[in-house]
Every structure is written in C-alpha cells, then in structure tokens.
Amino acid sequence: MNVIRTAANGIVNSDTIFEFTQDQELVSAKYSGGKIRRGYLVGSIKNNRLHFSYCQVRINGMMDNGISICEISYEDDKLILKEEFEMSSESGKEVGVNIFKEI
C-alpha cells in the first residue's frame, strides 16, 4: 500500500511503501520511503476498523509515534484505508487524515 492522500501535516506520502501482514485480527506492517527511513505498526481489526500504534524514524533522524484508527473499504477491488492519526513527535502532538490504497 501507499498513501494516495496525505494530511497537510502528514509525514508519509505516495513514496512511502507499506508491507502489511495479517494473522486473523492481528495486523502489522513495516514501511519506508519518501520522508520515512523506517517505520513499524501493529494493531488489530475489529468490526471493519483497523486500530494500530506506530513508530517511525524520518530520513532527517526525527522520531515519531502515535495511534491511528482506519475505516476499511474497497474501490476497484483495491483495499482502501481512511486513517485518522494522532502523532507525537519532537515537534509536539498532531492529528490528521491520510488515505491509503492497495498497490
């Protein structure tokens, strides 16, 4: 997956590639690209919503972490995640919405 719409304050973008795995309700991913050197997330799916925590290191060395809730849908047989995130970083706390789409 990658991000097809990034929040104004978002760090991930279309150059950030996410590799998701799922084992029943447990979901995890590693990601990198764009402004992200390396990131990880882990969470669970319940009632067609994905809840996860994440941590990431930007290419400039800044570290972020946070929580997200995603609505799951499909478009043209591709998985879509509408992510509402809350991020904590060295700059403070931020909130926003990103849209992910299966590649």
Image: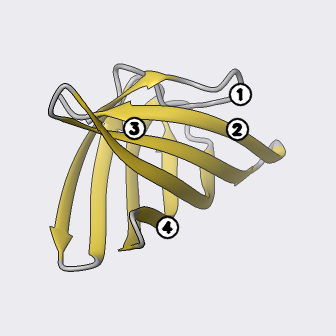
Left or right for 57, reference 74? right
Question: Which element is circle 2 on?
Answer: strand
Mark closer to the chain start, 3 or 2: 3
- The residue tagged 1 is 9
Judge depth for marks 3 and 1 and give the one in front.
1
Give the mark, 3 or 4, whose residue is nearer the N terminus: 3
**Residue at the (22%, 34%) spot, across then down:** 102
**Distance between mark 3 and mark 1 Cα atoms:** 18 Å
* Residue picked out by circle 4: 51
Q: In the rendered structure, which amino acid carries the disc numbered 2?
A: Gly
Q: Could you say where residue 79 lies in the image, as x and y percent from the top left?
A: 25, 40
Above or below residue 31? Residue 45 is: below
The quarter holding residue 24 reads bottom left
Sequence-wise, which precedes: disc 2 or disc 1?
A: 1
Task: Please say if 61 is above or below 48.
Answer: above
User: Of the residues tagged 2 and 1, which is closer to the observer?
Assistant: 2
Identify residue for label 2.
Answer: 96
Neighbour class for label 1 at 10 Å: few (<14), some, many (≥20)?
Answer: few
- Under mark 3, the amino acid is Arg
Q: Which amino acid does label 1 sit on?
A: Asn
Comparing labels 3 and 2, the label whose residue is closer to the camera:
2
The x, y position of residue 5, in whole percent, is: 50, 21
Identity of the amino acid at label 4?
His
